[in-house]
């Protein structure tokens, strides 16, 4: 491992590359990004950091839509990923053909898609949002009386519809990690730790969100652990977040919310199987980039320009 880390550090310098990692990657990957002047953040901040950093190459440790977003925002940079196989159940569950048909059937609706989608789905949308800005953007659209098509995460969509009262037609996708959190078991755990506050990512089912003391994106949950007075937190999101959350709130006791697990997908692990693919060896081989088809992100130029519009709309709104 030490050897692999040293080699990665050397390659980052030689290739004028910077490591951009999501909070759900394994702790050693997040630590390496921090040590080497890269960034560890939520998906909105990853996009911004990559776009604004002067490095020629970005190595995106996360899942494919994050690499694609980086390429859309920074076409002149080389965007590498530890593996192009790291996808997302939301992206997989929202193929462009059927999604586009769904949009065509409701031409009077504004199309808002979650960042966890392909470049083609983004290109079909009016707005792209991440979980840290979704609520504000839908509030803004609702204030203009827009009817909304929302895709693909039905849990996040329902949460936003409930909070804003917006008129939203939902695509029926879900995150296989957050979908596993169990309300019944969480209620039991809360009884055992009545002093604990419950932090929930809104990709979780409504029954779990209903038990939350704070609901938000990964960065918002980390902030909540840091700023809320409680000494203990029950956390319903991918366990990768514990690395940064514990760093941000060193004296707090963090425990994982219970998952069910359907055996076929993430086996009650509360850890995204695709995020877990971002190992040291894979990063090393991406930086060596001997075979670009294994690591490099390309986005067709016409598609890129169409996907850039709703992404820029989000970034301008967030600025
Ligand atoms: P955020 O980091 O934007 O909250 O996204 C969560 C997620 O599911 C990324 O895969
Ligand atoms: Fe997709 Fe869920 Fe994995 Fe995030 S945690 S990449 S939403 S499957």
Image (spheres, grey):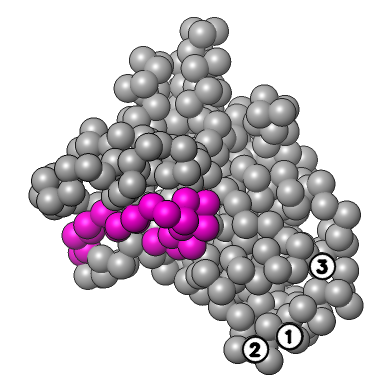
Q: Which residue does the image show at 33% across and 47% down from the upper left?
A: 231
Local crowd size for mark 2, using a 10 Å CA cut-off: few (<14), some (14–19), many (≥20)? few
The tally of labels here is: 3
Tell me where residue 270 appears, x and y as whole percent.
33, 62
Q: Are marks 1 and 3 in contact (CB under 8 Å)?
A: no
Tell me where residue 50 appears, x and y as whole percent.
75, 52
Of callouts 1 and 3, which one flags the residue occurring earlier in the amino acid sequence? 1
Q: Is residue 123 above or below residue 49?
A: above
Q: Is residue 200 above or below residue 111?
A: below
Q: Which residue does the image show at 61% across and 80% down from the upper left?
A: 280
List the residue tagged with mark 1: 6
> Could you tell whether 173 is left or right of 211 in the image?
right
Q: Nearer the viewer, residue 47 or 291?
A: 47
Rounded to the nearest angstrom, the CA distance separating label 2 from label 1 is 6 Å
- Quarter of image, res 168: top left
Local crowd size for mark 1, using a 10 Å CA cut-off: few (<14), some (14–19), many (≥20)? few
Rounded to the nearest angstrom, the CA distance separating label 1 from label 3 is 15 Å
List the residue tagged with mark 3: 17
List the residue tagged with mark 2: 2
Determine if the C-beta at disc 2 is less than 8 A from ligand 2.
no
The region drawn magenta spans 239-262
Q: Which residue does the image show at 59% across and 66% down from the upper left?
A: 30
Q: Nearer the viewer, residue 123 or 131?
A: 131
> Could you tell whether 69 is left or right of 305 in the image?
left
């Amino acid at each position: 491992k030490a050897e692999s880390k040293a080699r990665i550090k050397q390659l980052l310098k030689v290739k004028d590359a910077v490591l951009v990692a999501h909070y759900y990657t394994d702790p050693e990957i997040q630590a390496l990004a921090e040590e080497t002047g890269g960034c560890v953040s939520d998906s909105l901040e990853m996009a911004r950091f990559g776009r604004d950093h002067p490095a020629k190459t970005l190595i995106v440790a996360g899942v494919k839509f994050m690499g694609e977003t980086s390429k859309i925002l920074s076409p002149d940079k080389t965007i590498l990923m530890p593996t192009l196989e790291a996808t997302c159940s939301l992206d997989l569950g929202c193929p462009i053909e059927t999604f586009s048909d769904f949009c065509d059937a409701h031409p009077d609706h504004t199309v808002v898609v979650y960042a966890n989608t392909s470049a083609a789905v983004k290109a079909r949308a009016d707005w792209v949002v991440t979980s840290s800005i979704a609520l504000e953007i839908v509030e803004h659209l609702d204030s203009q009386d827009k009817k909304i098509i929302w895709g693909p995460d039905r849990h996040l969509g329902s949460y936003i519809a409930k909070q804003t009262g917006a008129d939203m037609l939902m695509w029926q996708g879900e995150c296989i990690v957050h979908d596993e959190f169990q309300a019944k078991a969480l209620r039991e755990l809360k009884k055992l730790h009545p002093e604990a506050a419950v932090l929930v990512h809104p990709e979780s089912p409504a029954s779990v969100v209903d038990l939350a003391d704070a609901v938000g994106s990964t960065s918002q949950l980390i902030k909540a652990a840091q700023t809320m007075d409680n000494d203990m937190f029950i956390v319903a999101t991918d366990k990768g977040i514990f690395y940064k959350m514990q760093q941000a709130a060193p004296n707090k006791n963090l425990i994982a919310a219970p998952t069910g697990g359907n055996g076929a997908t993430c086996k009650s692990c509360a850890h995204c199987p695709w995020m877990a693919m971002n190992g040291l060896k894979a990063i090393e081989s991406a930086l060596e980039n001997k075979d670009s088809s294994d690591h490099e992100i390309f986005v067709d130029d016409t598609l890129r320009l169409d996907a850039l519009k709703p992404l820029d709309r989000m970034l301008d709104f967030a600025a």
